[in-house]
Amino acid sequence: MSTQSVRELEEKIAELKRRIPPHSVPPAMLQHLEELEEQLREAREADEQT
């Protein structure tokens, strides 16, 4: 993945974290956050290998 993809994922994660309510977090939001963070980790690892 490109550096731009990493940046886009970081922005999506930041936006989602801003939208998460402080109490009673919906499980779907947490799952989506975990998926985005996993994609970001994989993108960063791919960038390191190139």
Image: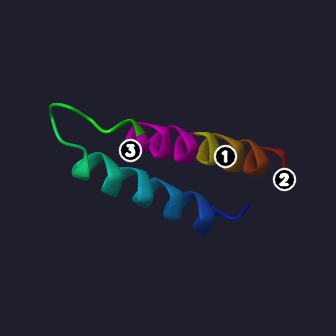
- Of residues 32 and 15, the one nearer the viewer is 32
Residue neighbourhood size for the residue with mark 2, other residues' Cα within 10 Å, grouped as few (<14), some (14–19), many (≥20):
few
Residue that carries the numbered disc 2 in the rendered image: 50
Residue 44: assigned label: 1
Q: Is residue 38 left or right of residue 13?
A: right
| 41 w.r.t. 8: above or below | above
Range drawn in magenta: 28-37
Badge 3 amino acid: Met
Looking at the rendered structure, which numbered label has been put on residue 33? none
Q: Residue at x 34, y 52 (%)?
A: 16
SS label for mark 1 = helix
Front position among marks 1 and 3: 3
Which residue is painted at 51% across and 37% down in the image?
34
- Write the residue at 39% across / 35% down: 27
Q: Position of residue 33 (x, y in %)?
A: 45, 43
Q: Is residue 34 magenta?
A: yes
Of the residues under marks 1 and 3, which one precedes in the sequence? 3
Tell me the kind of residue under disc 2.
Answer: Thr
Residue tagged by mark 3? 29
Q: CA distance from mark 1 to mark 3?
A: 22 Å
Distance Cα–Cα, label 2 vs label 3: 32 Å
